[in-house]
Image (tube, rainbow, N blue to C red):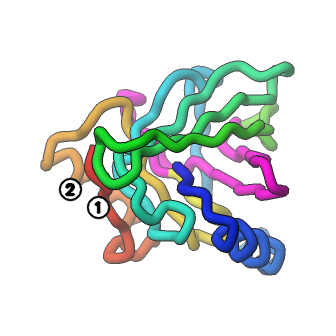
């Protein structure tokens, strides 16, 4: 979710997002229930689908905090350029939890420049320390954790993404 803004990338992304096919109930992945605490604090981006907006981004994160209403989340996505000590780039958005009365697992985030992303929580670890999120079409997938995982935990995270039906060979693992 971290962003490295380029005017051309913004235009391309907006065009792609606006041309996305309509989601049908049969093509949507299942989500898991999460508590309101899921949308609090900082999550480190452990793995992601490559996209132009994140080229050169490492040490990515998403920070969630309380919004103006119970179903709203203030979102800050950021990354460092080139190396974990590189220049910080961040963007702020407003998330709306679309299924607040039930699972709280579907969030739509509106960013500047009319860019909108849907993030659905597909899996959350029993100890609440990491989760897997994707867009409804499973085109983009992210793995987040509260801290940098061990190699064995990272293998377990990737294996779980595969079990959920995602082609894990597409994932990239930016340094933290």
> In which quarter of the view is residue 149 placed?
top left
Q: Is residue 147 left or right of residue 155?
A: right
The numbered mark at residue 159 is 1
The crowding category of the residue bearing disc 1, from other C-alpha atoms within 10 Å (few below 14, some 14 to 19, many at least 20), is few
**Residue 56 percent coordinates (x, y):** 40, 61
Could one spot residue 13 in this view of the protein? Answer: yes
**Residue 41 percent coordinates (x, y):** 52, 22
Establish if 172 lies above or below 39. below
The residue labelled by disc 2 is 155
Range of the magenta residues?
Answer: 103-132
Q: Residue at x 80, y 28 (%)?
A: 71
Query: How many tags in the picture?
Result: 2
The numbered mark at residue 106 is none
> Which quarter shows the C terminus?
top left
Q: Residue at x 45, y 44 (%)?
A: 79
For mark 1, give the secondary structure.
Answer: helix
Q: Is residue 150 left or right of residue 31?
A: left
Establish if 3 lies above or below 28. above
For mark 2, give the secondary structure.
Answer: helix
Marks 2 and 1: in contact by CB < 8 Å? yes
**Residue 67 percent coordinates (x, y):** 77, 22
Q: Does the segment drawn in magenta span residue 122?
A: yes
Name the dominant secondary structure of the magenta segment.
strand
Q: Is residue 30 left or right of residue 151?
A: right
Could one spot residue 23 in this view of the protein? Answer: no
Establish if 131 lies above or below 170. above
**Residue 86 percent coordinates (x, y):** 34, 43
Q: Residue at x 48, y 48 (%)?
A: 123
In-front residue for pair 29/59 = 59
Report how far apart the C-alphas of labels 1 and 2 lie in the structure. 6 Å
């Amino acid at each position: 979710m971290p962003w490295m803004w380029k005017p051309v990338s913004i235009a391309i992304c907006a065009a792609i997002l606006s041309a996305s096919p309509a989601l049908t109930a049969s093509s949507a992945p299942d989500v898991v229930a999460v508590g309101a605490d899921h949308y609090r604090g900082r999550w480190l981006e452990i793995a992601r689908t490559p996209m132009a907006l994140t080229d050169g981004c490492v040490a990515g994160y998403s920070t969630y905090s309380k919004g103006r209403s119970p179903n709203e989340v203030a979102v800050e996505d950021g990354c460092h350029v080139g190396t974990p000590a590189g220049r910080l780039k961040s963007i702020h958005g407003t998330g709306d939890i679309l299924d607040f009365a039930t699972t709280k697992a579907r969030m739509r985030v509106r960013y500047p420049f009319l860019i909108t992303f849907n993030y659905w929580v597909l899996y959350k670890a029993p100890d609440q320390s990491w989760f897997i999120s994707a867009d409804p079409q499973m085109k983009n997938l992210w793995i987040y954790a509260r801290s940098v995982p061990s190699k064995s935990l990272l293998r377990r995270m990737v294996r779980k993404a595969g079990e959920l039906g995602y082609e894990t060979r597409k994932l990239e693992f930016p340094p933290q």
